[in-house]
């Protein structure tokens, strides 16, 4: 058993960290006030997209994908290390420069498409020329995804889609959407749900209400499909493959969402420990009080446990396994861990922890989402319990 990070992956990680400091940090600095005030402007989005194009040019953005579509074929462990480094940086604009866990970025799911569709949709995504969105959730179907109501009915060489999606990240900006619809109401999860690629601007496809979140930005929207005609050639995989595709998409991203939690937790402990050395109360630095030390020590232990679970999951995926149990464990443990760690960091900072000008308030709000998206904590526990025969 070898716990060392392979030297070639260490090298990629170091150069990625230099890229973050050299090219991303200055953009964070430029928009420091807007980031604090949660003012997300078109100019900032443009600056983020420019960083994304730069990251794609170097090769980081789609590095997890095969060379045939413009990626580096970087292993899951390699990409996990990059996502972890991104979280550790605490940079707001960092969210633009890697693919997963960002849901608007290139996904392995599109490797299930025909070579023609890969060329048309995946290759421009990897070059950061386009963005996408993943549209599964509906007002009446979230955790119970097989209960979606959006229908797709075959009509010659097209399908006609009708339905409403909500909470769709990047839905207002995406060049295309991966949309899940029922094609056989009897079968549903057993071959009755199909995934379609739907281009922005297709007649009958509109953006509905914008849904403001706790994180401040408004990047979630409703998508509406009214008699929207989509070519049958735009199906991902084949008719009825959609539910399997959705689960595969969510499962394949677990190591990356786990790594994001890990990195952000590291960031919280680092800035809180630094503050504890500086901030004085009752005549000494607060870091000399056992209460503060214990909060940070507990966080450090939890991060260490999460790190090895995450690397192990990434390693299993690289061995060709599809580890449902370990994936759910990482999603559950790491998202809950980073919430505890961010909460303690706010506590260490005291009142400064609650101010938007402090370094942890934004992280505290952001990480709350991670226990909900891509399968809630409760759903992860269900999956794990099933592996215990329950
Ligand atoms: C910021 C944000 C971004 C999102 N981005 C996207 C996106 O890009 N694309 C997309 O398709 N979706 C997206 N979502 C939707 C997200 O995936 C869903 O919110 C999530 O799957 C939960 O579904 P729900 O909100 O309908 O909650 P519900 O399913 O209604 O659940 C409510 C509560 O009941 C619990 N619960 C449900 N079933 C069970 C059960 N069997 N046992 C125990 N407890 C249960 C849940 O855990 C939860 O606590 C996003 C959501 C948010 C908040």
Image (cartoon, rainbow, N blue to C red):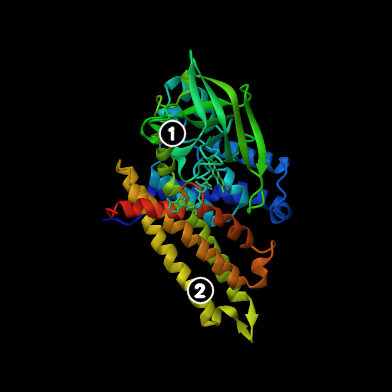
- Residue 56, above or below 373: above
How many labels sit on residues? 2
Q: Residue furthest top?
A: 156
Residue 6 visible? The answer is no
Q: Position of residue 328 (x, y in %)?
A: 39, 51
Image quadrant containing the C terminus: bottom left
Image quadrant containing the N terminus: bottom left
Q: Position of residue 74 (x, y in %)?
A: 41, 40
Q: Is residue 279 left or right of residue 82?
A: right
Tell me how far mark 2 sits from mark 1, CA to CA: 40 Å
Q: Secondary structure at mark 1?
A: helix
Residue ID for mark 2: 295
Q: Residues within 10 Å of mark 1 (few under 14, many from 20)?
A: some
Q: Secondary structure at mark 2?
A: helix
- Residue 141, above or below 192: below
Q: Position of residue 107 (x, y in %)?
A: 47, 36
- Indicate the quadrant where residue 172 lies: top right
Residue ID for mark 1: 109
Answer yes or no: do the residues labelled 2 and 1 have beta carbons within 8 Å?
A: no
Residue 182 visible? The answer is yes
User: Residue at the spot x=61%, y=84% of the render?
Assistant: 284
- Who comes first in sequence, dot 2 or dot 1? 1
């Amino acid at each position: 058993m070898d716990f060392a990070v392979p030297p070639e992956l260490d090298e990629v990680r170091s150069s990625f960290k230099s890229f973050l400091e050299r090219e991303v940090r200055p953009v964070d600095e430029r928009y420091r006030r807007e980031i604090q005030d949660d003012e997300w402007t078109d100019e900032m989005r443009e600056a983020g997209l420019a960083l994304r194009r730069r990251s794609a040019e170097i090769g980081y953005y789609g590095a997890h994908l095969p060379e045939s579509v413009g990626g580096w074929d970087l292993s899951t462990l390699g990409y996990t290390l990059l996502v972890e480094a991104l979280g550790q940086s605490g940079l707001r604009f960092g969210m633009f420069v890697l693919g997963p866990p960002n849901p608007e970025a290139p996904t392995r799911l599109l490797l299930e498409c025909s070579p023609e569709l890969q060329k048309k949709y995946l290759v421009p995504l990897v070059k950061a020329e386009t963005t996408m969105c993943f549209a599964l959730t509906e007002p009446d179907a979230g955790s119970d995804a097989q209960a979606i109501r959006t229908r797709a009915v075959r009509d010659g060489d097209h399908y006609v889609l009708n339905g409403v999606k909500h909470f769709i990240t990047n839905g207002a900006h995406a060049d295309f959407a991966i949309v899940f619809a029922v094609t056989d109401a009897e079968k549903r999860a057993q071959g009755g749900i199909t995934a379609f690629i739907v281009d922005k601007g297709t007649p009958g496809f509109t953006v509905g209400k914008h849904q403001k979140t706790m994180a401040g930005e408004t990047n979630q929207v409703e998508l509406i499909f009214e008699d929207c005609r989509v070519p049958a050639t735009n199906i991902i995989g084949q008719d009825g493959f959609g539910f399997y595709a959705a689960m595969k998409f969510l499962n394949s991203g677990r190591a990356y969402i786990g790594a994001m939690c890990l990195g952000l937790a590291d960031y919280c402990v680092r800035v809180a420990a630094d503050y504890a050395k500086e901030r004085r109360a009752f005549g000494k630095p607060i870091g000399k009080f056992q209460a503060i030390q214990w909060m940070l020590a507990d966080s450090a232990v939890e991060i260490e446990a999460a790190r090895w679970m995450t690397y192990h999951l990434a390693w299993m995926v690289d061995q060709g396994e599809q580890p449902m149990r370990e994936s759910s464990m990482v999603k559950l443990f790491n998202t809950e861990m980073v919430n505890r760690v961010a909460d303690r960091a706010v506590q260490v900072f005291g009142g400064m922890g609650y101010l938007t000008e402090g370094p942890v308030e934004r992280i505290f709000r952001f990480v709350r989402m991670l226990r909900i998206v891509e399968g809630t904590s409760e759903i992860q526990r269900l999956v794990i319990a099933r592996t215990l025969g329950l």
